[in-house]
Image: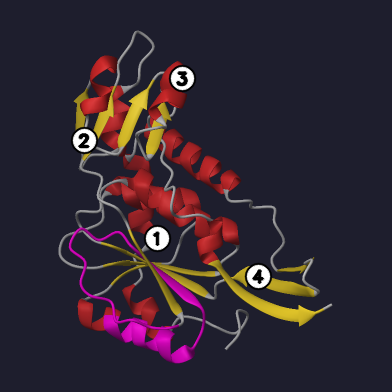
């Protein structure tokens, strides 16, 4: 099955979240918060080369008298898994946007478990143009994943569930599990950051104010510092957000390349 011919099964439409739910969530989300979501989408989209060709073919000639030919194109489909405790719309958008930027045509968000999606997460999907969002029980999720596996298409799973169940291994299916973000250190000064926005962006994390001289003792992987401290903080932390970026996010291990399928050929010159 090719990229152009693959579609998710027809029965998925029965579980689609109604458009009216998205509209109500959007209206209930304050404009400044929507603005931070838009900023995250725009920045992550830009970093992941949205203007790159849909498909590329690169030939390199090497000294040993051979060449490599690399063909690269978007995956056929991506499934994002979230649950009731996936509360950070900003982090969810930071995972979704590289797939959009890579040109993946078939993207499905699946909400599993009990409860409902938060209004901010629904608003994020609305802003990103992600209309395919469904609610599935585990049995139907297994049926969906079996369908994708049996279709033999190149695919990926983005697992942002707080309590993930096992996903059976499939040769044609990549898997990315969202790292846990339990605490974030913040160095305050007269110019910020905006703590209300930071708490909105990470409602499930502990936000801890830390003095500059105590940063080295912080056990987490994420810090928010003033612009002049960014270079120094990069040595010790996986993600550094400067003041003015406190409401945004980026996954360092999830780029547009993850959402590409690649074929390599060795040839004689």
- Residue 133: name its quadrant: bottom left
* Residue situated furthest left in the rendering: 114
Q: Residue at horizontal 84%, vertical 77%?
A: 269
Residue 232: assigned label: none
Query: What secondary structure is marked by label 4?
Result: strand
Q: For mark 3, what is the residue?
A: 227
Q: For mark 4, what is the residue?
A: 72
Residue 19: assigned label: 1
- The x, y position of residue 110, in whole percent, is 33, 68
Find out whether residue 162 is within the magenta segment.
yes
Q: Sequence-wise, which precedes: disc 1 or disc 4?
A: 1
Find out whether residue 212 is within the magenta segment.
no
Structural distance between the alpha carbons of marks 1 and 3: 41 Å
Q: Sequence-wise, which precedes: disc 4 or disc 3?
A: 4
Query: Magenta region: which residues?
Result: 142-171
Q: Are marks 4 and 2 in contact (CB under 8 Å)?
A: no
Q: Nearer the viewer, mark 4 or mark 2?
A: 2
Structural distance between the alpha carbons of marks 4 and 3: 37 Å
Structural distance between the alpha carbons of marks 1 and 4: 35 Å
Q: Sequence-wise, which precedes: disc 1 or disc 2?
A: 1
Q: For mark 2, what is the residue?
A: 219
On screen, residue 248 versus residue 169, left or right, reads: right
Q: Are marks 4 and 3 in contact (CB under 8 Å)?
A: no
Q: Sequence-wise, which precedes: disc 1 or disc 3?
A: 1
| Vertical position of residue 126 compared to residue 143: above or below | above
Q: Are marks 1 and 3 in contact (CB under 8 Å)?
A: no
Structural distance between the alpha carbons of marks 3 and 2: 21 Å
């Amino acid at each position: 099955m090719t990229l152009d011919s693959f579609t998710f099964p027809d029965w998925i439409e029965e579980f689609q979240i109604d458009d009216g739910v998205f509209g109500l969530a959007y209206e209930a989300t304050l404009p400044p918060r929507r603005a931070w979501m838009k900023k995250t989408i725009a920045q992550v989209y830009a970093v992941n080369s949205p203007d790159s060709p849909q498909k590329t073919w690169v030939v390199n000639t090497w000294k040993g008298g051979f060449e490599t030919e690399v063909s690269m194109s978007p995956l056929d489909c991506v499934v994002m898994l979230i649950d009731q405790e996936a509360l950070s719309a900003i982090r969810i958008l930071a995972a979704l946007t590289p797939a959009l930027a890579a040109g993946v045509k078939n993207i499905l968000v699946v909400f599993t478990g009990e409860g409902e999606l938060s209004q901010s997460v629904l608003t994020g999907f609305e802003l990103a143009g992600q209309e395919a969002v469904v609610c599935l029980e585990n049995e139907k999720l297994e049926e969906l994943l079996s369908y994708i596996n049996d279709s033999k298409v190149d695919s990926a799973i983005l697992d942002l569930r707080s309590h993930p169940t096992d996903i059976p291994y499939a040769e044609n299916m990549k898997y990315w599990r969202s790292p846990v973000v339990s605490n974030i250190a913040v160095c305050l000064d007269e110019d910020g950051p905006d703590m209300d926005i930071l708490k909105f962006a990470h409602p499930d994390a502990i936000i801890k104010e830390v003095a500059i001289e105590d940063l080295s003792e912080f056990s987490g992987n994420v810090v928010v510092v003033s612009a002049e401290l960014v270079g120094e903080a990069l040595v010790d932390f996986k993600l550094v957000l400067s003041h003015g970026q406190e409401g945004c996010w980026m996954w360092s291990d999830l780029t547009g390349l993850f959402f590409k399928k690649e074929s390599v050929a060795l040839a004689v010159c």
